[in-house]
Image (cartoon, rainbow, N blue to C red):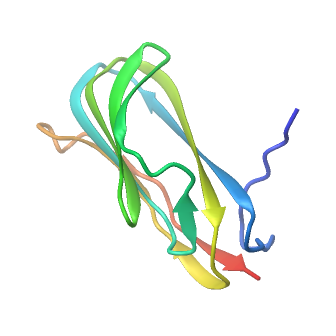
Amino acid sequence: GPVLEPVSAENTLQTGDRLKVRIIIRTDRDMEYVHMKDMRASAFEPLTAISGYNYQDGLGYYESIRDASVNFYFDYLRKGTYVFEYQLNVTQKGEFSNGITTIQCLYAPEFAAHSKGIRVFVE
């Protein structure tokens, strides 16, 4: 099957490449009203541009696709591990800073986490 390679500063992307974003969430408790925001570099455009409600692995969530990010809204997030994937196209050449992914419980903001950002090179 297809093999996924991580994007890093060592490997350079080409315009026209297709990327698959994979976000893995591990939670040790049940949470309500959670917001996750995945910011992306300006060289990437999502393959799908329609926001909507999705259902995956027993979890329902609303996915909102914006200009610079993709937002996920969860009414109820059960304890466990979840994997979210969506695809992007590489559209521009240059050096870009890829944004971070943040997740936070809206009514208990002390429950929050974020990823690190990376530099992306497109030829």
The reply, left or right, for residue 94 in relation to residue 81 is: right
Q: Look at the picture and state if 28 lies above or below 120.
A: above
Q: Look at the picture and state if 81 lies above or below 62.
A: above
- Quarter of the picture containing the N terminus is top right
- How many numbered discs sit on the rendered protein? 0
Q: Look at the picture and state if 109 lies above or below 29.
A: below
The reply, left or right, for residue 34 in relation to residue 82 is: left
Residue 30, located in which quarter of the rendered image? Answer: top left
Outermost residue to the left: 107
Q: Position of residue 65 (x, y in %)?
A: 38, 52
Name the residue at 71% across, 61% down.
7
Name the residue at 25% across, 24% down.
31
Q: Position of residue 61 (x, y in %)?
A: 34, 29
31 vs 52, nearest the viewer: 52
- Quarter of the picture containing the C terminus is bottom right
Outermost residue to the right: 1
40 vs 102, nearest the viewer: 40
Residue 118, located in which quarter of the rendered image? Answer: bottom right
29 vs 75, nearest the viewer: 75
Q: Position of residue 93 (x, y in %)?
A: 67, 84
Q: Look at the picture and state if 97 lies above or below 27.
A: below
Name the residue at 16% across, 40% down.
106
The reply, left or right, for residue 88 in relation to residue 110 is: right
Outermost residue to the bottom: 94
Residue 12, located in which quarter of the rendered image? Answer: bottom right
